[in-house]
Image (cartoon, rainbow, N blue to C red):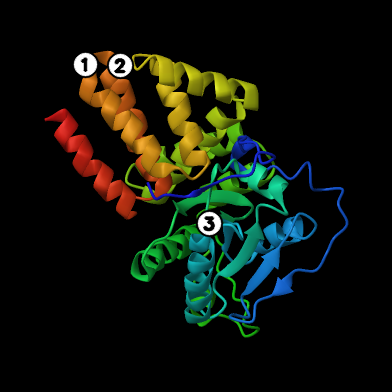
Amino acid sequence: MSQNTPMPPNATPGINLRGAVDLSALKNRATSPSTPSAGSPYAVDVNEASFQEFVQLSQKVPVVVSLGSGRSQQSAQINAVLEKLMNDYSGKIALGRVDVDSSPQVAQAFGITAVPTVVALINSQPVPMFEGDLPEAQIREFLDELLKVAASNGVTGNLGGAPDPEAATEPPLPPLHQAARDAIDAGDLEGAEASYEKALAEMPNDAAAKVGLAQVHLMRRAAEINVVQAEEFRTRAAGDRDDLEAALAVADLDVTGGHVEDAFARLVKFIGTHFGPERDTVRVRLLELYDVVGVSDPRVSASRQALARALF
């Protein structure tokens, strides 16, 4: 993990219920226009007053949220790279820059603990990205994968004004996939789960349904953990490496909060030091989290190699 600047003390880690960003503390704030970037027309400065409006943009295009601090040189570096890439993607992705020192509640909504941290939103749902500074080529890989996930969820707009020719050729979602997405938007995770399970029953090789089901499973588990319970699970996991429930819960918390490598490493280590039913339970959960993050994600590829070493 990169050496990141610690979060300010008033940005307390939390958890995102149902996988959505918790905007309850921000909803009553007056709307304030975002400040466009001089480096890219697709990048804006976002604060607590304008954040909710920015989240709504994720219904049209995937949005990247860069949570940084003026105290962190890495934050400035990563924003410069992201602004350049926003121009390269020509309005298919939007960038919002958040200063966590002046907007701590935005950082709290995502549950981050270090800066810079980069997350994404598709249909107001968080997508784990990365933390720390990364080479431009690797960030581009993340953004390419983000566009694929967005397309699979029907988010294919363009901020450039003219219709995106690629988006125009996107086929509509299959009926069961659309039903699942509508259920998620309505907060009906049980209904979404049923739709994806039915899609897989009809077509067992439906990769998109498999990914969607894994995401819904994570949302349902996350919805059952409040902030106090999250801290309790972390304490238990740190004090007892054999605590299966805590290991699984903390891995879910880490993925939801964008700490994907930490989640994978925790579960791989558990698999390498345990045997029998517990080991298989963790292995199945890890494979499901691979689906949530994306099988082509470089962090998944690296973790698969570590998993193979742990198993054999």
Q: Is residue 5 visible?
A: yes
x and y percentages locating residue 208 in the rendered image: 42, 50
| Callout 1: SS | loop
x and y percentages locating residue 166 in the rendered image: 48, 77
Q: Which mark is residue 275?
A: 1
Specify the quadrant of the image occupied by residue 55: bottom right
User: The C terminus is located in which quarter?
Assistant: top left
* Three-letter residue code for mark 1: Phe
Question: Residue drawn at (50%, 70%), measured in percent from left and top?
Answer: 82
Cα separation, mark 3 vs mark 2, equals 34 Å
Question: Residue drawn at (34%, 30%), measured in percent from left and top?
Answer: 266
Question: Residue drawn at (49%, 45%), measured in percent from left and top?
Answer: 258
Instruction: Please tell me how crowded label 3 is: few (under 14), some (14-19), or many (20+) other residues with Cα within 10 Å.
Output: some
Q: Is residue 169 visible?
A: no
x and y percentages locating residue 69 in the rendered image: 60, 57
Cα separation, mark 1 vs mark 3, equals 38 Å
115 displayed left or right of 57: left
x and y percentages locating residue 124 in the rendered image: 64, 52
With respect to residue 94, does 298 lie above or below? above
| Residue hosting label 2 | 278
Residues at discs 3 and 2 in contact (Cβ within 8 Å): no
* Front: mark 3 or 2: 2
Cα separation, mark 2 vs mark 1, equals 6 Å
Instruction: Please tell me how crowded label 1 is: few (under 14), some (14-19), or many (20+) other residues with Cα within 10 Å.
Output: few
Q: Which mark is residue 253?
A: none
